[in-house]
Image (cartoon, grey):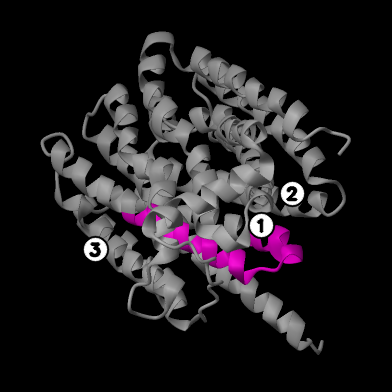
Amino acid sequence: MMNLTAKQLNFYKKILIATFLGISSGMPYFVFYQTLPALFRESGMQLSTIAAFGLVSIPYTLKFAWAPLVDRYTIPLFGHRRGWMFLMQILLIFIIAILGLFNPVSNIPIFVVLSFLMIFFSATQDIVIDAYRRELLDDDELGTGNAWFVNAWRFSTLIPGSLAFIMADIIAWKYVFPIISFFMLIGLFTTLFIHENSVPQKSTGNLSNAIIEPFKEYFNRFNIKHGLLLLIFLMLYKLGDSMATALSTPFYLDIGFSKTVLGTVAKVAALWSSIAGAFIAGMIMRKISLNKSLWLFGFFQLFTILGFAWLASINSPTKTDLFIVISLEYLGVGMGTVAIISFMFKMSSKAFAASQIALFTAVTAIPRTFINATTGYIIENVGYTDFFLICTACAIPGMLLLLFIAPWKE
């Protein structure tokens, strides 16, 4: 039997924590972006309305605004980071459990309010989990730790994006959502048993300084021009595949696949490939620089969008066609996600982890929140095939910015 050193055991413990927290982070995200669209479409809601409903996810984009408060204040329970995580997880369990009690067509205002609260609690949980993970992992552990976190985040889609669809073919939605919420206990129990690792924030004086100083430090480190260019790059790097997958659930339903096929073939394809993509990214990034990784993975995720255009253009696509197209797309998604997260962590300061990482992840959420809200309108006017060609074109600007922020030779 292999004898592990204390350092190795501590490393594996960190990876396990990152994995369980990844599941907790992914669950509410996939409830909003996969489970709810299926419920809405089945209820007869138009694609343009479903896409516009994505604007409710605006807290993912604005979370940097209250991240300094999370850095500064402590919930009087379990410690600085753990207290916030525990509170958000309790609230998320409750919100998810009651979503299925209402008819979306006749109760849109209720869904807007409940979904907004779920996204707000989810965004706040993400602020804390990202900061905790930055403090937990040493610099040489970031690549592996982020790969496991991303894989667990993706793995969580099996519940709201696979199990939920299969159950919805058998039982009513009002029973499906409480079952989904039960799996949030994974994150809750993790929070209860982990140790507090919060790094004390630099002295910031009053509340105004506490909010301003994290962003001041960032722009002082990179200067205004380069700092803004980096933020624009974060917004554009995954724009194409973000748009392409925005209405993937209604797309699969509209080209003739059942919810059971979505819960089996589609979700298995997306899961295995995104997990494989993250592991492949981790291995490649140990051999080549982060800059080269951003180039390679970016081109791969750009070209795989064309698979969706092909799928939309053929008559009666088979399950095999669906499996291949989704597998290639999410292989690129998995690789690109690990690279961009590692890039964000490299850009951040441990002293202001919550605030700066929240800013970076919020910027990457801008396309998902605002641009994706137009996807339903675009599809209804040009059709699915041309829409996916537009998505491919939208991936090009982010690649061009690599010339300035991540040159191939560096």
Any part of residue 172 in sight? no
User: Along the line of sight, which residue is nearer the eye, 394 or 263?
Assistant: 394
- Locate residue 253 relative to residue 108 in the image: left or right: right
Q: Residues within 10 Å of mark 3 (few under 14, many from 20)?
A: some
* Disc 1 target residue: 147
Amino acid at the residue labelled 1: Ala
**Residue at 64 percent of width and 27 percent of height:** 398
Magenta stretch contains residue 277: no
Q: Residues within 10 Å of mark 2 (few under 14, many from 20)?
A: many
First-in-chain label (2 vs 3): 3
Residues at discs 3 and 1 in contact (Cβ within 8 Å): no
Residues at discs 2 and 3 in contact (Cβ within 8 Å): no
Q: Mark 3 falls on what kind of element? A: helix
Residues at discs 1 and 2 in contact (Cβ within 8 Å): yes
Amino acid at the residue labelled 2: Ala
* Disc 2 target residue: 281
**Residue at 49 percent of width and 54 percent of height:** 355
Q: Residues within 10 Å of mark 1 (few under 14, many from 20)?
A: many
* Disc 3 target residue: 94
Q: Which residues are magenta?
A: 121-148
Residue 245 in percent (x, y) is at: 49, 33
Residue 380 in percent (x, y) is at: 36, 14
- Locate residue 42 relative to residue 358 in the image: left or right: left
**Residue at 66 percent of width and 63 percent of height:** 145
Q: Main secondary structure of the magenta part?
A: helix
Any part of residue 133 in sight? yes
Amino acid at the residue labelled 3: Phe
User: Along the line of sight, which residue is nearer the eye, 101 or 32?
Assistant: 32
Query: From the viewer's perspective, is residue 345 above or below residue 49?
Result: below
Query: From the viewer's perspective, is residue 354 above or below residue 246?
Result: below
